[in-house]
Amino acid sequence: MTSNHDVEAEPDCFFNPDLFVNKSLVKVNYSIQDLEQQPVWVSAASCTDHDQTGEIVWPISIFLSWFVAARRDLFRDQQVIELGAGCAGLPGLIASRFAKDVLVTDGNYLVLETLQRNVAETRGIFRTITDHSCEPGEPVEPMFKSTCYGQSTYDCSVGVGDEKALNNNSSAVAVSRDALTSCWHEKGKLETRTLLWGDKESVEAVVNEGWRPQILLGADIVCWIDFVTPLLQTVKFLFLHAPDRERAVLFLGFVNRANSTERFLYAQARAFGMSVKRVPHETFMPIEKRCWPSELQTAQELEVLSISLDPTLEGYDSPVSFEESRAYDWATPC
């Protein structure tokens, strides 16, 4: 006679991890600089579990999006990839307003479905229209109508690009004159796909599909030290396949949560032949932080770093070896 114990299936056979994932979504509209609001779908639950952090739009993602909007001249007619985009891919979606081709990527299946939805909606709204049609020589209107988002009476009304005001340490935002208008430009691809850092097959597939970006974006993707090496391997591989490798750049929205991780990032970047530089927030945000939007009023120090190949460093153009890494396909790294 067979006992009940003998015929019981292993519990794992019936285990579905999705039962414990809140899949309900809410639409949030983000105001970035002077742009029309960017709608994104995000998780209705605020969860910071290691494998669900990509379902949240963190302040640093908004901060990097402000950088993209302010420095839109850098993105015009460029091919851009966002790494570790999470469910929203906000910086990548903002970049798609100006760049020719944009690919937003993540390695976490939990967020890819929502990311695909956000990409599809953005493609339908913003990739079929232009911000403004202008002719050469047409008068340029200021890109921003500067507003103080804080509760103080500090004067935040100085126009963008006012170099004299900037030198006087007022709340101006310095951008090039070329960035002060949104002229028509050809719209290209806006897509999403899985990209596993440090996985040769995954990274090569992106390049073989024709993605050779000049600019990479990443917001809050350096949190855990174990992900730094796979990330930098992926970044350097894409740099080496860029149209102009020495001008290829990663703009990284960074929050220093551990000094050891920050030191390791700088050291590993140098080992890969890349330099890391801080982008002064005064070049794309009001100087006075009290004038920043409420979403950016945080105790955390928000930074944008630029990472690029450095010809003065040994091995900057050497090929990437992926043997020391592995694919991280189980979680968004922050």
Image (cartoon, rainbow, N blue to C red):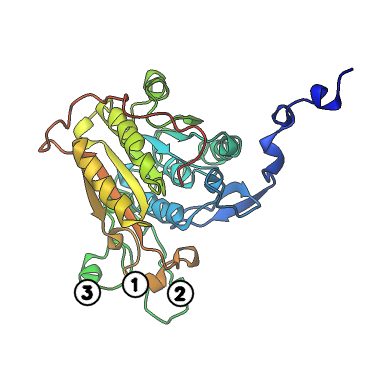
> In the image, what residue occupies the spot 38% across and 40% down?
227
Kindly identify which residue carries mark 2: 150
57 vs 232, nearest the viewer: 232
Q: Around disc 3, counting alpha carbons within 10 Å, would you say few (fewer than 14), some (14 to 19), or many (20 or more)?
A: few
Instruction: Give whichever of discs 2 and 1 has the lower sequence position.
Output: 2
Kindly indicate whether the residue at mark 1 contacts the one at mark 2 (C-beta within 8 angstroms).
Answer: yes
**Label drawn at residue 168:** 3
**Label drawn at residue 47:** none
What's the amino acid at mark 2? Gly
Instruction: Give whichever of discs 1 and 3 has the lower sequence position.
Output: 3
What's the amino acid at mark 3? Asn
Q: Residue 12 at what x, y percent from top left?
A: 69, 30
Q: Which residue in the rendered view is the most extreme toward the bottom?
A: 153
Q: Which residue in the rendered view is the most extreme toward the right?
A: 1
Q: Nearer the viewer, mark 1 or mark 3?
A: 1
315 vs 227, nearest the viewer: 227
Where on the picture, by quarter, is residue 70?
Answer: bottom left
Kindly indicate whether the residue at mark 2 contacts the one at mark 3 (C-beta within 8 angstroms).
Answer: no
Q: Around disc 1, counting alpha carbons within 10 Å, would you say few (fewer than 14), some (14 to 19), or many (20 or more)?
A: some
Q: Nearer the viewer, mark 3 or mark 2?
A: 2
Kindly indicate whether the residue at mark 3 contacts the one at mark 1 (C-beta within 8 angstroms).
Answer: no
61 vs 93, nearest the viewer: 61
Image quadrant holding the N terminus, namely top right
